[in-house]
Image (cartoon, rainbow, N blue to C red):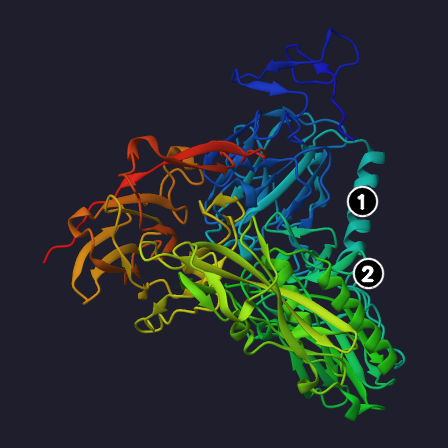
């Protein structure tokens, strides 16, 4: 508890019993301000307020005063509402000092304070000075730092300055570490108490001892080998998990199950806790193992796993005697960004050949960088019987089917439908689906032909026992129930086709989309089929091969700041998902269309490498349009011109080519400059009259962030103006 000392504002710096008492401050012989207590020692004046402290450099900016409970996912154990977080103050490479106002030391002369981070104690420390003296009385660093268990946590320290009672003192925190965040090259500070009684000192020392006892390595007991592992669901934190190496699996690696990633996505955890190495830096690596167990039951092992496309992240079943990795599973086997990434999905391992053997589970995070350089794990079950396994298989499948119909739900459902289970899944299900189509108008289309490749399963029933048929077609206003083998698609629009798989009394339905366009409209110009139907693409240069399977996504926002893509419809082409190597380029070629109407077209572009090219059907180029709206400014404020992955609609006058058959190329230009990525959507090739560009805009929502403040929690609407595309192509 902080205690303010009452002292004399009289001539001499003596503690007299008699005299006129004051509770404020006075002047020392040099005329400087002297306080009875440190000003704002607990940073409780307010968030972003460092009143009472002076700074040099940039390491101790006011942005470090926060009211959060965590730093880097670690519960720090602050005192009061606020504390100083060096991590939040700015770039960890920043250096500088934070100096208190001068105060008269009273009480026992022992100063209490909370200290965290500061891995390199030679560069990050707290010093105490007598006013007017150059040499520090005492220097304190975080001697208890022990990555990964004691890092950002605020540990109570007691600085003994008892020989200086009655002297004018000030405190200075120094950060001379130019390292990175993962080096903990900053200081966390709180609760400087400069007047303490003996009882308060005793309490502070006990607080320190208790906290250190609660931290450090978790308990691990392997006194006997059972048929199960201890704490396989991480409900008891990291207890009974042994750290083998690295720093990825410290205390921060245990997350609450209600935690969301990207602000709105579930990790699909079970119980109240799960393992989440994303809470450490993605560059952190490490490995932990479970207690040993004797494999029993029917030898099935199951777990929930998510996290990364990198094969260096995995879970292994290991021989308890030789440490040999017998089986491995990795989230890279199913990873799809963004649909299946950090969210965990069920894996099964058939280890029946090792029944009766002593084994253990090892979790490895071997990825020292992005993308997705971390792992999520939960609900590890060993020694499962066939009955238990079948029940769990069915439970997960039914859960997935009830998720809804968005991109994440659909991908999850497909995963559980297509997974190679250790036993036949006792559920009637599709094992492959009809893909969405984009075609030109046609009065007679055999929709049943689009079911080619569709398959279903039910336990061990032979594949040829199932029948497949089209059930109905809807154009949004009218529903059709016949003539599916010669269906009239002469009217442009979006058609939803419902089809079914049948076996005896069992039926399962699914749908696919057919987008129908006339000669003047580009097929799948808005990527509303959810794929690259009607587009062909080059392999790209160097390592720039495009990934067509993952390139079309439904996400409307990107990054933690929730910036808008300005997507039209349900999908857009996303360069991040198409190609992770930004310095290389590729092209997407459309089908042909006849330029009609006014001869104007429009398209959306985002990214610094995006450009649109137009060709005659014979391959003669006629136009090229660059993304002139790209701007790496005022992040993340769209209203102040920020245009990164956020797309802008361009309108282009091609009226010189009316009546010509044309096609379009969407290009990611080879570039080594920043933001060398491309995003596209809404390629519209027919306008009856020329669009009035000055009157057109796209409404988006973004979350405003002041230059010196915290990003707002409520969205702001903004209209992104259309831009006239400038043809830069020259023969």
Q: Answer few, some or many: residues within 10 Å of disc 1's Cα (few below 14, many 20 plus, some between 14 and 19).
A: some
Q: Is residue 385 visible?
A: no
Q: Above or below — where is 429 with respect to 134?
A: below
Q: Residue at x 83, y 90 (%)?
A: 355
Q: Which mark is residue 235?
A: 2
**In this orientation, which residue lies closer to the viewer: 487 or 252?**
487
Q: Residue at x 51, y 48 (%)?
A: 556
Picture coordinates of residue 77 (x, y %)?
73, 44
Q: Is residue 617 visible?
A: yes
**In this orientation, which residue lies closer to the viewer: 431 or 698?**
431
Q: Above or below — where is 438 with respect to 117?
A: below
Picture coordinates of residue 543 (x, y %)?
35, 73
- Residue tagged 1: 207
Q: Residue at x 68, y 69 (%)?
A: 305
> Decide: marks 2, 1 in contact (CB < 8 A)?
no
In this image, 284 relative to 56: left or right? right
In this image, 673 relative to 302: left or right? left
Q: Secondary structure at mark 1?
A: helix
Q: Earlier in the sequence, mark 2 or mark 1?
A: 1
Picture coordinates of residue 99 (x, y %)?
54, 33
Q: Quadrant location of the N terminus?
A: top right
Q: Answer few, some or many: residues within 10 Å of disc 2's Cα (few below 14, many 20 plus, some between 14 and 19).
A: many
Find the residue positioned furthest to the bottom: 353
The answer to which quarter of the image holds residue 535 is bottom left
Q: Nearer the viewer, mark 2 or mark 1?
A: 2
Picture coordinates of residue 623 (x, y %)?
19, 54
Q: Above or below — where is 522 with respect to 708?
A: below
**In this orientation, which residue lies closer to the viewer: 698 or 448?**
448
Q: Secondary structure at mark 2?
A: loop
Q: Quadrant location of the C terminus?
A: bottom left
Find the residue positioned furthest to the top: 20
């Amino acid at each position: 508890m902080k205690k303010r000392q009452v002292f004399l504002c009289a001539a001499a710096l003596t503690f007299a019993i008699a005299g006129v008492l004051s509770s404020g401050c006075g002047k020392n012989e040099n005329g400087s301000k002297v306080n009875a207590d440190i000003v704002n020692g607990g940073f409780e004046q307010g968030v972003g307020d460092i009143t009472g402290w002076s700074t040099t450099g940039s390491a101790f900016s006011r942005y470090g005063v926060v009211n959060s409970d965590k730093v880097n996912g670690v519960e720090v154990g602050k005192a009061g509402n606020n504390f100083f977080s060096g991590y939040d103050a700015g770039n960890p490479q920043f250096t500088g000092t934070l100096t208190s106002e001068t105060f008269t030391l009273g009480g026992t002369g022992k100063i209490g304070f909370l200290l965290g981070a500061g891995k390199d104690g030679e560069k990050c420390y707290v010093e105490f000075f007598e006013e007017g003296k150059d040499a520090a009385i005492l220097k304190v660093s975080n001697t208890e730092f022990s990555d990964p268990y004691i890092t950002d946590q605020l540990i109570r320290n007691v600085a003994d300055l008892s020989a200086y009672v009655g002297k004018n003192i000030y405190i200075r925190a120094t950060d001379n570490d130019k390292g990175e965040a993962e080096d903990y090259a900053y200081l966390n500070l709180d609760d400087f108490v400069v007047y303490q009684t003996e009882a308060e000192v005793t309490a502070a020392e006990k607080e320190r001892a208790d906290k250190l006892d609660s931290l450090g390595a978790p308990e691990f007991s392997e006194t006997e080998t059972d048929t199960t592992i201890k704490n396989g669901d991480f409900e008891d934190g990291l207890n009974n998990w042994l750290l083998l190496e690295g720093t990825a699996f410290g205390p921060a690696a245990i997350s609450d199950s209600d935690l969301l990633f990207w602000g709105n996505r579930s990790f699909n955890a079970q119980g109240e806790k799960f393992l989440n190495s994303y809470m450490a830096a993605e560059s952190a690596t490490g490995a932990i193992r479970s207690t040993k167990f004797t494999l029993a039951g029917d030898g099935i092992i199951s777990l929930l796993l998510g996290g990364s496309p990198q094969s260096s992240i995995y879970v292994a079943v290991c021989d308890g005697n030789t440490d040999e990795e017998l089986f491995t599973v990795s989230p890279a086997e199913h990873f799809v960004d963004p649909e299946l990434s950090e969210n965990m999905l069920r894996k099964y391992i058939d280890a029946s050949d090792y029944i009766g053997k002593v084994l253990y589970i090892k979790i490895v995070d071997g990825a020292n960088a992005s993308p997705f350089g971390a792992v999520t794990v939960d609900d590890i079950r060993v020694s499962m019987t066939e009955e238990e396994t079948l029940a769990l298989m069915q439970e997960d499948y039914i859960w997935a089917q009830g998720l809804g119909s968005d991109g994440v739900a659909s991908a999850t459902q497909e995963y559980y439908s297509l997974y190679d289970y250790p036993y036949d899944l006792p559920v009637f299900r599709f094992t492959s689906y009809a893909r969405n189509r984009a075609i030109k108008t046609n009065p007679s289309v055999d929709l049943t032909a689009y079911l080619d490749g569709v398959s279903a399963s039910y336990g061990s029933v032979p594949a040829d026992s199932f029948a497949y048929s089209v059930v109905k077609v809807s154009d949004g206003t009218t529903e059709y129930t016949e003539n599916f083998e010669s269906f009239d698609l002469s009217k442009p629009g979006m058609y939803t086709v419902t089809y079914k798989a049948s076996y005896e009394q069992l039926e399962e339905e699914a749908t696919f989309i057919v987008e129908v366009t006339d000669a003047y409209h580009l097929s799948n110009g808005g990527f509303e089929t959810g794929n690259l139907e009607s587009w062909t693409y080059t392999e790209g240069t160097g390592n720039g091969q495009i990934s067509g399977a993952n390139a079309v996504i439904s996400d409307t926002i990107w990054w933690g700041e929730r910036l808008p893509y300005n997507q039209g419809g349900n999908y857009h082409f996303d360069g991040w998902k198409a190609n992770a190597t930004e310095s290389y380029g590729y092209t997407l070629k459309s089908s042909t269309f006849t330029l009609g109407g006014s001869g104007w077209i429009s398209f959306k572009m985002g990214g610094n490498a995006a450009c649109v090219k137009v060709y005659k059907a014979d391959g003669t180029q006629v136009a090229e349009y660059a993304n002139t709206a790209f701007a790496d400014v005022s992040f993340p404020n769209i209203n102040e011109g920020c245009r990164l992955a956020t797309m802008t609609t361009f309108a282009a006058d091609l009226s010189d080519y009316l009546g010509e058959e044309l096609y379009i190329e969407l290009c990611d230009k080879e570039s080594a400059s920043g933001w060398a990525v491309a995003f596209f959507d809404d390629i519209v090739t027919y306008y009856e009259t020329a669009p009035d560009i000055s009157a057109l805009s796209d409404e988006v929502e973004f979350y405003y962030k002041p230059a010196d403040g915290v990003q707002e929690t409520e969205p702001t609407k903004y209209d992104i103006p259309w831009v006239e595309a400038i043809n830069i192509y020259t023969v």
